[in-house]
Image (cartoon, rainbow, N blue to C red):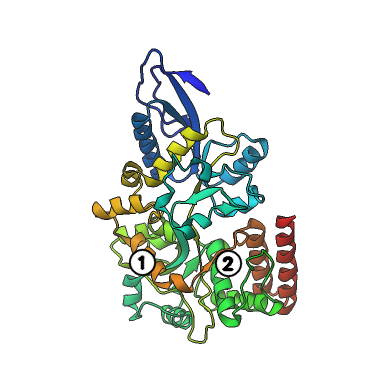
């Protein structure tokens, strides 16, 4: 919409749907374009993003930004409704998998290539740009790369005389030494899926989901996953996925975890504040592994609505979010190490490329040539639910691993077929 510039009322930052404009802007004749921007995140992310948007508005007085934000819970459900009704925000933080979900023909988001006079695409490599390409259209740009990372509370490991683990065998030895007093490695449901897939791929060399979106695992691969999950629980490597509690990393009950690189601070920051030394372990695999088995992907991405009335103004905001020194200063590495060359150069110049997340980034780079690009279907919530359900069925003895592997293979095949229909 177009609105006359006038004194803007201050709005509390805690409101879910709010304008980021808190400074009064007074003019008499000029018109101001209003665009919307949506994202998810915790209070800290919301706070710095709002401050950054206020700076964008100061630098671009012809644009007013309406902010739409919340925690992750429920965000995608609302996004489903908005995308279906074409009421989505002009500029959006999106997940990598959403390109396939909402733009299977490449038409679900605006083609950013058409806005290259506003968005400096030279800040990104061809491979990085390809993450957002769909049918020849640039649907989105990645903010940073992400991977499931192994975080170890070295202080706790030292108490047991244990070295930082490098293999699955090391993890089981740690569990034996800790004898149920601590769990050496813990995971939420998504990290569990990635770890089980990694282990099965390391055994067989088969890719879980092929590049064409079809299933690459056999029934035997699924049996490997299911039996490995039960072994992890029975030998007290980790609690059952549904009983994982992040706060137990803070108080030292958990001696390690697998979590996204971009979540380094939120998962392990409490343990560091409590005086523990936290380190990044190698991506776990045994010597017999035929593949690394671990995946990388864009942490999150920015896209522009295909239905926006103001593509130029939206593109200016998108460029600010990705490439500006101002946004880099506010955001730091909270969303991962920026891929944008200009943003990363600013952080390096100002000494902000430090800390646990940067250590995780360096570990990812060390193994990047052996890592696989994630299939956008791998984070499908139905797949996560089927895997967890099958893991519990075998663990509780409701069915055998052979029987459940066939069921799981069929269920995931159906999910992939339905996702592409």
**Direction top: furthest residue:** 28
**Residue 131, placed above or below residue 161:** above
Residue shown at 40%/59% (left/top)? 264
Q: Residues within 10 Å of mark 2 (few under 14, many from 20)?
A: many
Which image quarter is the C terminus in?
A: bottom right
**Label 1, residues with CA under 10 Å away: few <14, some 14-19, many ≥20:** some
> Which residue occupies 67% across, 72% down?
216
In the picture shown, does residue 389 fall above or below 110?
A: below
**Label 1: element kind:** helix
Q: Say the numbered circle drawn on residue 193.
A: 2
**Left or right placement of residue 320 versus residue 297 in this view:** left
Residue at left 54%, top 51%? 95
Give the distance between the C-alpha atoms of the residues marked 1 and 2, in whole angstroms: 24 Å
Q: Which tag, 1 or 2, sits closer to the chain's start?
A: 2
Left or right, 142 with respect to 234, comes to left
Q: Is residue 365 left or right of residue 133?
A: left
- Give residue 22's quadrant in the image: top left
Q: Quadrant of residue 63?
A: top left
């Amino acid at each position: 919409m177009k609105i006359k510039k006038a004194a803007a009322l201050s709005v509390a930052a805690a409101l879910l749907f709010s304008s980021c404009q808190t400074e009064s802007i007074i003019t008499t004749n000029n018109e101001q374009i209003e665009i919307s921007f949506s994202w998810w995140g915790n209070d800290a992310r919301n706070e710095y993003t709002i401050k950054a948007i206020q700076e964008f508005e100061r630098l671009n007085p012809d644009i007013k930004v309406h902010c739409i934000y919340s925690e992750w819970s429920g965000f995608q459900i609302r996004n489903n409704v908005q995308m279906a009704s074409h009421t989505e925000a002009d500029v959006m933080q999106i997940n990598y998998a959403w390109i396939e979900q909402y733009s299977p023909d490449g038409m679900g988001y605006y083609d950013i290539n058409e806005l290259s006079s506003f968005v400096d695409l030279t800040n990104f490599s061809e491979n990085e740009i390809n993450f957002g390409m769909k049918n020849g259209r640039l649907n989105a740009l990645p903010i940073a790369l992400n991977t499931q990372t192994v975080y170890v509370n070295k202080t706790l490991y030292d108490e047991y005389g244990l070295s930082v683990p490098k293999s699955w065998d090391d993890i089981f030895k740690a569990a034996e030494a800790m004898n149920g007093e601590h769990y050496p490695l813990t995971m939420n449901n998504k990290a569990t899926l990635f770890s089980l897939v990694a282990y099965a791929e390391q055994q067989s060399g088969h890719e879980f989901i092929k590049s064409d979106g079809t299933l690459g695992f056999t029934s035997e691969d699924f049996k490997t996953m299911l039996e490995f999950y039960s072994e992890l629980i029975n030998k007290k490597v980790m609690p059952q996925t549904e009983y994982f509690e992040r706060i137990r990393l803070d108080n030292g009950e958990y001696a390690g975890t697998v979590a996204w690189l971009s979540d380094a601070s939120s998962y392990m920051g409490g343990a560091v504040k409590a005086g523990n030394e936290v380190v990044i372990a190698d991506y776990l695999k045994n010597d017999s592994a035929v593949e690394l088995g671990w995946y990388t992907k864009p942490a999150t991405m920015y896209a522009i609505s295909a239905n926006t009335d103001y593509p130029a103004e939206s593109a200016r905001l998108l460029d600010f979010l990705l490439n500006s020194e101002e946004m880099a200063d506010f955001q730091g590495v909270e969303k991962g190490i920026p891929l944008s060359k200009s943003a990363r150069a600013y952080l390096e110049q100002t000494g902000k490329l430090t800390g646990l997340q940067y250590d995780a980034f360096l570990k990812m780079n060390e193994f990047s040539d052996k890592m696989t690009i994630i299939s956008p279907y791998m984070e499908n919530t139905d797949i996560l639910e089927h895997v967890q359900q099958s893991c519990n069925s075998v663990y509780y003895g409701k069915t055998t691993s052979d029987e459940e592997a066939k069921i799981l293979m069929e269920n995931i095949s159906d999910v992939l077929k339905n996702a592409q229909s």
